[in-house]
Image (cartoon, helix red, strand yellow):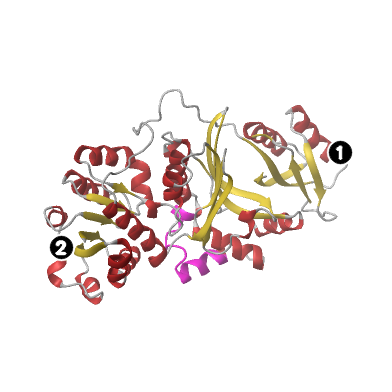
Amino acid sequence: MKTVGVAILGLGVVGSGTYTILRDHRDFYRRTQHVDISVESVLELNKQRALDLGIEESRIADNIAEIVSNPAVDIVVEVIGGVEPARSFVLAALHSGKTVVTSNKELFCKHWYELEKAAKRTNAGLYFEASCVGGVPIIRTLVDGVQSNVITRLTGIINGTTNYILTRMTREGADYASVLKDAQKLGYAEKDPTADVEGFDAAYKLSILSSLAFHTRVPLEKVYREGIANVSAVDIAHGKDLGYVLKLLAIGKNNENGVEVRVHPAFIRKDHPLASVNDSFNAVFLQGDSVGDVMLYGRGAGALPTGSAIVSDIIYAATHADHKYATFKNTMLPEKGVKFVNDFKSRYYIRFTVKDRAGVLAKVAGIFAKSNISIADLLQKGDGDESGTPVILITHETHELAVRRAVEKIRSLPDVFSVDSLIRVEG
């Protein structure tokens, strides 16, 4: 039976979950996978945390040099998070010929090309299933499940914090600020929630997933990003009345126009499969030219779900002699000739407040007409008063830049108090 030694860098939530799975399932993996996986070392500054997990003091390393020089360690698991010192630690492991498994989406998104170059140089493995969508095996699916397909589109709810917040706002009609505070108390949101609520976390993941799905390097800088901090309970309620559910979506498309990647709040029909993905759950919806529609659903974060993905990579690396690398030219910049779509197309929900005066809506409609934007629905909410009349319109599919220009012109009309929200509507 093959014996594999593992080192874990960091025993936080995910690192502790990973260690627990490896410890408790060791006999199970011997029996079912025919591999004996032992945790030979951990790098953890808080030694008591390691001791509380039952790790022998002799296996607690003080620095990365101890890990990479340890001949008993074959696979290094990085769950520190952030770019540094994680990048330096991972490179040290790869340069020493050790396979690396990581859950670090920011590191991987920003330095994938550099890490893979180091891995190829020493014929080491580089695995990252846990970097995207927690325990949902989306990366293994893209690499080893649907590789017979040309993937034309992926749409996902890939951040649990924002999905929890939007679910609560939808169910309860609560405002964003109060639900965010609750999410922080419950541990769903960090003390500084910026990475989640401003869409950075989802953008990191979309960069990785779209690169794999479309077989081309999709840098983070090409991902349009918009968070949920300005989402209003009023708009969620209006959307519900119109048959829509609001989600923070990660959308990737690959067609004759080029590669399109964006993260932003969007309304989807209440009968769409993603509309029922609630709370901290995640899901990714794929469209392949042969298989058609495929959806993967599960927990997108947490100690054991993410640990499950990490251990899956450990087992895969331990039981496969040849390591796979990217199917595309993996460099810092995208390949020449790859076109990225900036002026994407969507439908739009727009809410604005106007003076209760004849002719105002005609002026608004006129601006849209001159911009070649057709209106599918136009609704006036309430009778209006001195503070103005709320008006909602939904466009037919049109171009992003045309809508932005039209909205700026509407904003400057003397009879328009404010343009309160602009939310994309996805089919």
Residue 190 painted magenta: yes
Q: Is residue 263 above or below residue 404?
A: below
What is the quadrant of the C terminus in the image? top right
What kind of element bears circle 2?
strand
Which span is picked out in magenta? 178-196
* Residue nearer the viewer, 83 or 40: 40
Q: Which residue is mark 1?
A: 359
Q: Position of residue 169 (x, y in %)?
A: 62, 63
Residue, x 44% and y 61% (percent of image)?
A: 301
Q: Which residue is mark 2?
A: 61
Q: Which amino acid type corresponds to the residue marked 1 in the rendered image?
A: Gly
Residue farthest to the right, as pictured: 358
Q: Is residue 398 above or below residue 205?
A: above
Q: Position of residue 231 (x, y in %)?
A: 61, 54
Count numbered badges in the picture: 2
What is the quadrant of the N terminus in the image? bottom left
Q: Is residue 157 visible from the viewing direction of this image? A: yes
What kind of element bears circle 1?
loop
Residue, x 27% and y 62% (percent of image)?
A: 34
Q: Does residue 210 appear left or right of residue 347 in this picture?
A: left
Q: Position of residue 274 (x, y in %)?
A: 61, 54
Of label 2 and label 1, which has the lower sequence position?
2
Q: Is residue 44 visible from the viewing direction of this image? A: no
The disc at residue 123 is none
Q: For label 2, count other residues whose C-alpha is less than 10 Å away and answer few (under 14), some (14-19) or many (20+).
A: many
* Alpha carbon separation for disc pair 2 and 1: 74 Å
